[in-house]
Image (cartoon, rainbow, N blue to C red):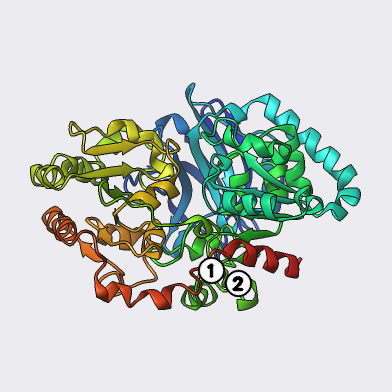
Amino acid sequence: METIVYVTSVKIKKSIIYMTLQSDQKLEPLSIELVCRNEMSPAAVPMVFSVSHTDRTVIQTSMDTGLLRLQNDDWEIAVSSETGKYTPILNGHMRAALILFSYKIKPGHNFLFFPMGGPGHKFLLRCRPLTKYDGAGTHIRELTALLLSKLLKPLWKKKKIWLIYEKYSSSAQDNGFYFFRYCMEQLPPEERRRIYFILDKASPQWPAMQKYRKQILPFMSFRHILYLLLADLYVASDARLHAFAWKPMPNLISREINRHDIFFLQHGVLGLKRVETLFGKNGASPMTYFAVSSEKEQRIVTEYFGYDSSHVPVVGLARWDALENKSDPCRKKILVMPTWRSWLEDKDDDFFCKSDYYQTYMHLFQNEALLDLLKTSNTCMVFYIHPKLKEFMKSFHSESPLIQLIPFGQCPLNHLIMECSMLITDYSSVCWDVYYLEKPVVFYQFDSELYEKTNGSYMDMEHDLFGDRCILEDQLINTIKDYIQSDFHEKEKYKKMRKDLFAFRDHNNCRRIYDFIIKNR
């Protein structure tokens, strides 16, 4: 019989968390540790415990969270015995208790610790910065919206409301926006009235979106929370919980959100980053419908993610409807856009500046051979950081006017893509947009071994990429030089791969998405 360890009780007193663990099998723990899940800054802190045996094993254990580092990390319990190592899961009583009651520790003014359930109801202790949504005002809006939604649901069910949003509900420049714009401009008024876009008022796109103001839901407003509960369908470029306050404490709203159907527009084409544990049918954030751009990508989703092909329509990305080549031969631009690193997200500036990621790009921006090459060819290099690392943009700097550092949100990403002559990335799906426009793509994969270990890929990155692959900085400089000398012409061998990687290269992706949703709702 499989040994399962349950968390059956959690109590918090100041900075100390007390827990009761139970197992139906006899268990003799050798050690119990609280283990940090961050691969780049691993830590294991021993917990004090005592064991008793009746008809089951009962373990009393505790931890002073003041001993933990104040980083944005998740921690889990590891119970080690001679028979194996076990990660406790929350029993039904504790799952309900965490939602209904407040279990939190404030070790300082800026951080919050709280217990929660992870994938498979594993017990997690989450540490994250405090936000403006952790106050009583948000809690009151949530409860009021929840009660009102119960009354309105029978009436509103017929409205069949769609809610559209993007990452963190903080932008309107990706697939969500382009699909929303299509709906607002191409659908009849009676259809438009039931389609809304969620957007934070702090978004750089907030002023421009006011032309649709009747259909814009201010993020975390009472109306937004109410519509989240009453919607028939979410249509989004990211997971369900990007429509709500990020990393919330356990609450009833999140539980209701996770029960809603969602059409996943995707943030980009799948290929260079394995995400089936997140977006797979049995993952942490499963989808109802999953948009893809080719039969090849559809096979990835059916084989690795576990979805039936009928729920994986080949429709293309909504934002591609607006793509066109706007590169100017007289103003050559090399766009540099690396993807994020899970081990750097939400870390402090000191941690980030010591990372290989930061050091590698700062060294590149100061490379004299590169600067001379840019100067002699009258070429500009534009660096645009991934939104998950946007708070670190201020750490980058360059003395050269030919190196432009553009913060997230300052300029729409699709404008940078359309205006660039070439892209340098690592594993970012933005490479597909540039490749779609028949522009050269260079993959600078200086940390490929670590990336393969922590993320993995659906493509063989040594043989299947549709652009040159560089590991060393000197390789990258030489490759840039070659493309400058060829006037940024795409190589023939990469051109030939395009027909297998895109099912459509027209301007009808939004229409195909809309038609699929209407047919299947």
> Dot 1, crowdedness within 10 Å: few (<14), some or many (≥20)?
many
In the image, residue 192 lies at what x, y percent? 75, 50
Tell me: residue 29, above or below residue 73.
Answer: below
| Comes first in the chain, label 2 or label 1 | 1
Q: Which residue is mark 1?
A: 292
> SS of the residue at dot 1?
loop
Callout count? 2
Q: Which residue is mark 2?
A: 313
Determine whether, in the image, residue 223 is placed left or right of residue 39.
right
Please say whether residue 96 is visible from this viewpoint.
yes
> SS of the residue at dot 2?
loop
Circles 2 and 1 in contact, beta carbons < 8 Å: yes
Near-viewer residue (521 or 27): 521
In the image, residue 459 lies at what x, y percent? 36, 72
Q: Residue furthest front?
A: 330
Q: Residue at 17%, 62% (x, y): give it.
A: 486
Look at label 1 and name its amino acid: Val
Look at label 2 and name its amino acid: Pro
In the image, residue 28 lies at what x, y percent? 48, 57
